[in-house]
Amino acid sequence: MALQITSTSFGHEQPIPAKYTCQGEDLSPPLRWDGVPPEAKSLALIVLDPDAPDPAAPKMTFTHWVLYDLPVDSRGLDEGVQANALPPGTLQGVTDFQRVGYGGPCPPIGRHRYYFKLYALDTKLPDLAQPTRTQLEEAMRGHVLAQAELMGTYQKH
């Protein structure tokens, strides 16, 4: 079975409910995954928006959540998970909101795409002291065994 990531709150390429955005409670959505390769030593999750600031003229990829060293026996994350409820050993990085933790969709204009990218790694990464997405991606280079993604969309109303 290939690595898969899903949510009970929205389907792939479907709208993300407002509850998980800046126009709602800004909670992280519930996530589940399956198909972690048996040789994997850890998982990483990056949530990003490649359409910032305007989907008609994107200028940057905005990072909404950075998690790594998730245990391979974890099967997902509960809705609104707080740092103290993350699976044991999980570490977090810094988002483009300049903080640690989930920051929901909050697009200034248009309908944006949000990618929840799950990576299975052949190693457990060292403590990277709250890395940015770029720093985490650099640390993961050459260690990705499998990856999966869930893409949701959001437009302010």
Image (cartoon, helix red, strand yellow):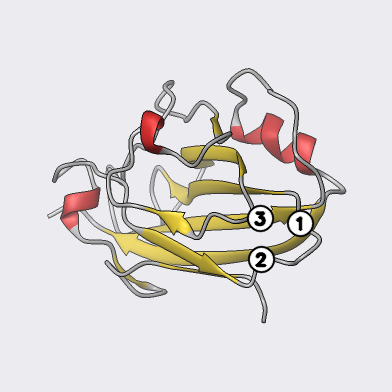
Q: Secondary structure at mark 3?
A: strand
Q: Which mark is drawn over residue 14?
A: none
Q: Give the alpha-carbon distance from disc 2 to disc 1, as whole Å.
A: 7 Å
Q: Nearer the viewer, residue 123 or 112?
A: 123
Q: Position of residue 117 (x, y in %)?
A: 56, 56
Q: Are marks 2 and 1 in contact (CB under 8 Å)?
A: yes
Q: Which mark is drawn over residue 36?
A: 2
Give the foreground label among 1 and 3. Answer: 1
In the drawing, does residue 142 fall left or right of residue 93?
right
Q: Which mark is drawn over residue 119?
A: 3
Q: Nearer the viewer, residue 106 or 102?
A: 102
| Quadrant of res 140 | top right
Q: Position of residue 114 (x, y in %)?
A: 42, 56
> Residue at the location (41% across, 74% down)?
12
Where is mark 1, residue-wise?
40
Q: Is residue 95 above or below residue 62?
A: above
Q: Position of residue 74 (x, y in %)?
A: 54, 54
